[in-house]
Image (cartoon, rainbow, N blue to C red):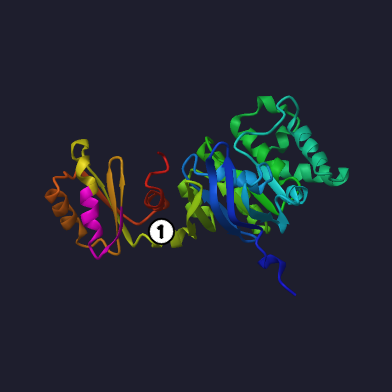
Amino acid sequence: MSDPSATPVVLAKDLVKVYPPDLRAVDGVNLEIRAGEIFGLLGPNGAGKTTTIKVLVTLAKPTSGTASVCGHDVVAEPQKVRECIGYVGQTVALDRSITAWDNLWMHANLHHMPPDEARKRIDEVLALVELADRAQDRVKIYSGGMKKRLDLATGLLHRPRLLVLDEPTLGLDIQTRVRIWEYLLEQKNQGMTILVTTHYLEEADRLCDRLAIIDHGKVQAIGTPSELKGQLGSEVIAVRVPEASRAGVGALTEDLKARPEVTGVAAFDEGFEVYLSGAAGAVPWIIDAAREKGVEVEAMTIARPTLDDVFLRVTGRKMRD
């Protein structure tokens, strides 16, 4: 007998979504998300992340390709998909005119939870997100962080197999961001699978089991954070150049790529990065190569690769851009 845990919770094959007249928001996405993992979806604004999620949670129909969630086809069995997922979008979906408890009671009814189970579970998730003492307050007096925590509670209420979160910590203070990730790690440890998009690369690096970087509607890279960073090499030298020298950066980076110890080069607005299998002795020849091309070096830093470096290499831009 096959192991149910070995079956992917999310499986997308050649997924395409085209908006009229010809906007190809998702362009052949292939994804496999395993049971019990936190999977991060990264990409610039407009890359196709949110559209991919909308297809997976049945809020948009794919133009072509297939996708299944919890073993159910998103087109043929949308209701079955909705029953097994919790979805928390970028915009808080709460009734601000009623209390936190009443919001959760409404969601419990939408999920057809038995009344006794619903009451018990509401108390549990309010305690989890540290809102038990504010359960009878109207949501309109909540702070932004409290609203986000309550929104997360609605997604967790019915114990979904898959929790889908679109930018769950965007715009929140650091303390609230940390606490929300603590909640998510608790759910993962209890066996929940979590799909999350985030603009905070340090969060993704520290907390996601695997990541996919999407750009122009395509998956451009996929793997664990360590695997993705390891593909760049062991060191990164970031070089900042003054504006007057930036015209020569393109020719310089082409020369640098020819060096055997260079695993890659990527340009950004203020300069360029060189990825190396070892940085020992690299600084002098980078400066010499820059001088030959008439590029002035303003500053240089040497560091281990980060997901920011991976993102720049894959998409050609930094996340903040």
Q: Residue at x 68, y 25 (%)?
A: 140
Q: Secondary structure at mark 1?
A: helix
Relative height, residue 204 to residue 279 (above, below): above
Residue 304: quarter of image: bottom left
**Residue 168 visible from this viewpoint:** no
Q: Quadrant of the C terminus?
A: top left
Residue behind mark 1: 229
Horizontal and vertical percent for residue 26? 55, 47
* Outermost residue toward the bottom in this view: 1
187 and 293: which one is in front? 293
106 and 266: which one is in front? 266
Does residue 91 appear to the left or right of 199 in the view shown?
Answer: right
**Which segment did they paint magenta?**
251-265
Q: Residue at x 84, y 47 (%)?
A: 117
- Tell me if mark 1 has few (under 14), some (14-19) or many (20+) residues whose alpha carbon lies within 10 angstroms of its own: many
Does residue 95 appear to the left or right of 116 in the view shown?
Answer: left
Horizontal and vertical percent for residue 257? 25, 58
Horizontal and vertical percent for residue 200? 48, 44
Q: Quadrant of the N terminus?
A: bottom right
105 and 166: which one is in front? 166
Residue type beneath disc 1: Lys
Relative height, residue 92 to residue 129 (above, below): above
* Magenta stretch encompasses residue 247: no
Q: Residue at x 80, y 44 (%)?
A: 111
143 and 192: which one is in front? 192
Residue 124: quarter of image: top right
